[in-house]
Amino acid sequence: METTAARTAPAVIVAIDGPSGTGKSSTSKAVAAQLGLSYLDTGAQYRAITWWMVSNGIDVTDPSEIAAVAGKPDIVSGTNPSAPAITVDGTDVSGPIRTQEVTSKVSAVSAVPEVRARITELQRSIAKSAERGIVVEGRDIGTTVLPDADLKIFLTASPEARAARRSGELKGADLHTTREALLKRDAADSSRKTSPLAKADDAVEVDTSDLTLQQVIECVVTLVEEKRATK
Ligand SMILES: Nc1ncnc2c1ncn2[C@@H]1O[C@H](COP(=O)(O)OP(=O)(O)OP(=O)(O)O)[C@@H](O)[C@H]1O
Ligand SMILES: Nc1ccn([C@H]2C[C@H](O)[C@@H](COP(=O)(O)O)O2)c(=O)n1
């Protein structure tokens, strides 16, 4: 619930990065809602462009084929933390971007420099137009997209904790398979040449393995409020 103090506070830009399943989306949405900030899920944008590539028969194993069409889809992201929305060429793709097919291909598509340049530009323009500030979550927000963010958080958690969270979400999917898939995606995202998943030198690292979601939210809200008090 947004407070009066939040409505009158100075604008603040918060970058939240980390590997898959560390709680970035859940935390970012809740913090933004509580503090009256906009919210941007940058993973959803990479998933949306991947969905478009797959739907249009692009060979996602061929970076030059991806690069040639990276500018074609029109991706529009909503920034309401209570109702995050994403469309591609006017079609709501919030469901289709979460399929296993898109999840298995998104690391390859998001590694292509032309894709990153396009999506990074979009992200910066959304952040710039957020009057009351924004929480932007992803993999390279603190290092590349918004290096001057007021606050940078890097969430981590053990592979076991992350796999348990994900298999809970996927209605009891096999823990070992889920863990291996998470680690494979992290390895691809961390080893790409252009803006890999990485902690910014000035980011605050929060290990969420043994924290409840509510504890993580409270920790980040406190960090944002402390930062706002110095602005
Ligand atoms: N601290 C926590 N304790 C227990 N469960 C959590 C915690 N944080 C998040 N979760 C749960 O873990 C799952 C993954 O969280 P979330 O989608 O926020 O992670 P993420 O880092 O955004 O992942 P991805 O990068 O893959 O999108 C969700 O079901 C969420 O409710
Ligand atoms: N800033 C970002 C955000 C996401 N990606 C890529 C890498 C992820 O595996 C994929 C999906 O993200 P998720 O929905 O799981 O948060 O998108 C990236 O490269 N940079």
Image: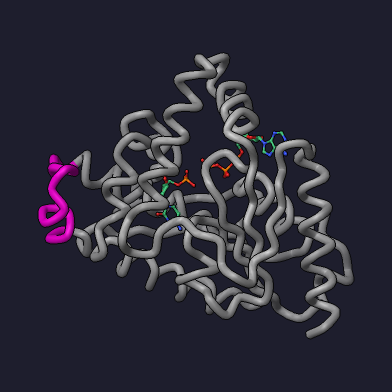
- Name the quadrant where ligand 1 sits: top right
Q: Position of residue 125 (x, y in %)?
A: 45, 75
As drawn, is 175 to the left or to the right of 116?
right
Residue found 42% across the figure and 30% down from its top: 181
Residue 215 falls in which quadrant of the image?
top right
Residue found 32% across the figure and 53% down from its top: 110
As drawn, is 146 to the left or to the right of 93?
right
Residue 70 lies, with reference to residue 225, above or below; the image says above
Q: Position of residue 106 (x, y in %)?
A: 33, 44
Residue found 47% across the figure and 62% down from its top: 140
Quadrant where the image shows the C terminus: bottom right
As drawn, is 67 to the left or to the right of 10?
left
How many labels, in total? 0
Between residue 185 and residue 30, name the one nearer to us: 185
As drawn, is 86 to the left or to the right of 13?
left
Q: Position of residue 95 (x, y in %)?
A: 43, 35
Between residue 39 and residue 165, name the one nearer to us: 165
Residue 177 lies, with reference to residue 1, above or below; the image says above
Visual colour scheme: one colour
- Point out the residue furthest to the right here: 4
8 magenta-colored: no
Residue 32 falls in which quadrant of the image?
bottom right
61 magenta-colored: yes
- Point out the residue furthest to the bottom here: 231
Q: Which residues are magenta?
A: 56-69
Q: Position of residue 51 (x, y in %)?
A: 30, 42
Residue 54 lies, with reference to residue 120, above or below; the image says above
Residue found 16% across the figure and 53% down from its top: 63
Residue 18 lies, with reference to residue 202, above or below; the image says above
